[in-house]
């Protein structure tokens, strides 16, 4: 089934949400996501690859096998969030879905670092955590159409990434992405993620 021409099956979506709902707030969270919130397909394409490389793709494929996504096209964020949670459940077990989502985003960052483009960028950014974070901010603006991220500097060795109207799980997935980005550059850092509410929060990064 090509996702370029056909919208995701509502049955697949509802079946996945039913499985995940006892272990995370996906049902309520999806209701809060505006239809205008969208994400590039490259992130959807990456999910099955991550669980396949880990040898734990069975659960994900039982729900979303055969899907195809254009890497550059924008898709509804709700579709991505459901599949992200399912990939996390497939990776770590449904009862550990948040740990799984953390590792999915952490892995995505380190996988990019091993690509040709990633290696070229890291040669420029590996000694500059602020520039690394600014690059991540710029990349988000190109790939997500919702919410707002910003950087606050706290001295020469600490920054805070501030998230507003971020519907993806800040405390697990987003936090994992921050860890992976710094790991990919070989930068030893400390991370503290705080929530104001489900959709607003920040990660304090010190090195």
Image: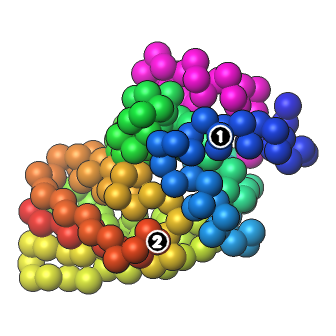
Q: Quadrant of the N terminus?
A: top right
Specify which label sits upstream in the sequence, 2 or 1.
1
Give how far across and how far down residue 164 sits, in percent.
45, 78
Question: Magenta segment: does it hold 49?
Answer: yes
Give how far across and how far down residue 138 sits, in percent.
46, 71
Residue marked by disc 1:
18
Per the model, the C-alpha gap separating discs 2 and 1 is 22 Å
Q: Can residue 143 be seen from the camera position used here? A: no
Magenta stretch bounds: 47-70
Q: Residue furthest front?
A: 22
Q: Which residue is rendered at x = 74% and y = 43% of the image?
A: 14
Residue marked by disc 2:
199
- Image quadrant of residue 169? bottom left
Question: Magenta segment: does it hold 17?
Answer: no
Q: Which residue is rendered at x = 82% and y = 44% of the image?
A: 10
Q: Nearer the viewer, residue 24 or 154?
A: 24
Q: Quadrant of the C terminus?
A: bottom left
Residue 191 in the image: above or below residue 37: above
Helix, strand or loop under label 1? helix
Q: Can residue 185 be seen from the camera position used here? A: yes
Q: Nearer the viewer, mark 2 or mark 1?
A: 1
Q: Nearer the viewer, residue 18 or 119?
A: 18
Helix, strand or loop under label 2? loop
Around disc 2, counting alpha carbons within 10 Å, would you say few (fewer than 14), some (14 to 19), or many (20 or more)? some
Give how far across and how far down residue 20 sits, in percent.
56, 40
């Amino acid at each position: 089934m090509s996702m370029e021409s056909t919208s995701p099956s509502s049955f697949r979506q509802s079946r996945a949400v039913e499985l995940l709902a006892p272990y995370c707030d996906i049902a309520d969270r999806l209701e809060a996501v505006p239809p205008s919130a969208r994400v590039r397909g490259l992130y959807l394409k990456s999910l099955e690859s991550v669980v396949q490389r880990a040898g734990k793709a069975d659960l994900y494929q039982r729900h979303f096998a055969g899907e195809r996504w254009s890497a550059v096209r924008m898709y509804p964020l709700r579709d991505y969030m459901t599949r992200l949670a399912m990939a996390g459940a497939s990776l770590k077990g449904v009862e550990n879905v948040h740990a799984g989502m953390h590792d999915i985003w952490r892995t995505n960052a380190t996988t990019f670092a091993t690509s040709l483009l990633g290696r070229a960028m890291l040669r420029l950014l590996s000694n500059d955590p602020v520039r690394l974070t600014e690059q991540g901010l710029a990349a988000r603006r190109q790939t997500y159409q919702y919410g707002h991220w910003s950087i606050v500097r706290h001295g020469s060795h600490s920054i805070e990434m501030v998230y507003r109207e971020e519907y993806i799980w800040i405390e697990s997935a987003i936090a994992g992405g921050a860890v992976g980005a710094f790991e990919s550059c070989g930068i030893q850092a400390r991370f503290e993620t705080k929530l104001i509410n489900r959709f607003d929060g920040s990660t304090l990064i010190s090195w």
